[in-house]
């Protein structure tokens, strides 16, 4: 399973990249705003900064919701760097935009996926990735992992090569469950990725090994 980090924070992206397990980055307009990145030029420069840190796909979201606007913004984003993936919302105009970009060989990530039907449409349009929002479904008492399982089954039935990118991942168990059910990618915060490494018995065991070594080497 590929690991993407879901942030626009350059320090966190660097830290995750230095772990050596990072495959890519996802951003969205809220994450950009959280980092105080505003204005078209600053936003474009920030995507380039991210691409210069991580050698892997970097999702950059369009703001327009009409087809012409999405195409214009998407082409501008794709020009920035070879690793840019144009993030398009799951709306009817978005489906048309995904088809357009697929024909042009530009990679897309169809975002705001909350149902299997939406995932099926995005795959038929030729999306490179789809982003089902796991945590936001859990937030409204709906099983986000069950949706990912359903999409996995549908994509496997027809050998769609669209990749399932589990998004809105909030904690390490989300990541583990995504791996169990065959999500192609997960994108989550640095805290969830780092939490995978933690176990109290590891810390205790290491403490004991070091203490025993110190005793024997007095
Ligand atoms: O990639 C989508 C993701 O950023 C949404 O996460 O935690 O805002 O639901 P969250």
Image: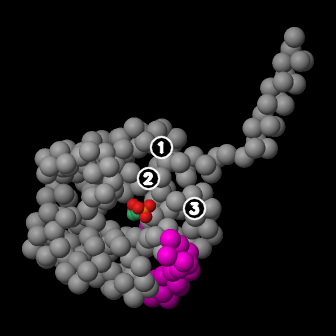
Q: Circle 2 sits on which residue?
A: 5
Q: Nearer the viewer, residue 140 or 42?
A: 140
In the image, what residue occupies the spot 41% across and 43% down? 13
Q: Position of residue 60 (x, y in %)?
A: 27, 58
65 lies left or right of 167: left
In the image, what residue occupies the spot 58% across and 64% down? 174
Q: Nearer the viewer, residue 167 or 139?
A: 139
Q: Circle 1 sits on which residue?
A: 16
Residue 146 in view of the camera: yes
Q: Is residue 45 above or below residue 60?
A: above
- The C terminus lies in which quarter of the figure? top right
Q: Position of residue 55 (x, y in %)?
A: 36, 47
Q: Residues within 10 Å of mark 2 (few under 14, many from 20)?
A: many
The quadrant in which residue 54 appears is top left
Q: Circle 3 sits on which residue?
A: 175
Q: Is residue 194 above or below residue 147?
A: above
Q: Residues within 10 Å of mark 3 (few under 14, many from 20)?
A: many
* Sequence-wise first label, 3 or 2: 2
């Amino acid at each position: 399973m590929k690991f993407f980090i879901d942030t626009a924070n350059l320090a966190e992206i660097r830290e995750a990249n230095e772990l050596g397990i990072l495959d890519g980055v996802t951003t969205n307009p809220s994450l950009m705003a959280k980092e105080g990145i505003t204005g078209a030029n600053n936003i474009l420069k920030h995507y380039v900064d991210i691409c210069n840190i991580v050698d892997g796909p970097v999702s950059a979201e369009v703001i327009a919701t009409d087809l012409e606007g999405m195409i214009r913004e998407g082409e501008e984003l794709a020009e920035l760097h070879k690793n840019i993936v144009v993030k398009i919302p799951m709306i009817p105009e978005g489906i048309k935009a995904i088809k357009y970009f697929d024909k042009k060989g530009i990679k897309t990530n169809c975002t705001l996926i909350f149902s299997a039907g939406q995932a099926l449409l995005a795959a038929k349009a030729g999306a490179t990735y789809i982003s089902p929002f796991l945590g936001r479904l859990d937030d409204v008492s709906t099983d986000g992992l069950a949706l990912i399982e359903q999409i996995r089954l549908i994509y496997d039935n027809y050998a769609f090569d669209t990749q399932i990118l589990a998004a809105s991942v909030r904690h390490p168990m989300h990541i583990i469950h995504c791996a169990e059910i065959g999500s192609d990618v997960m994108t989550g915060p640095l805290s969830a990725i780092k939490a995978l490494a933690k176990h109290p018995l590891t810390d205790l065991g290491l403490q004991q090994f070091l203490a025993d070594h110190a005793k024997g080497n007095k």
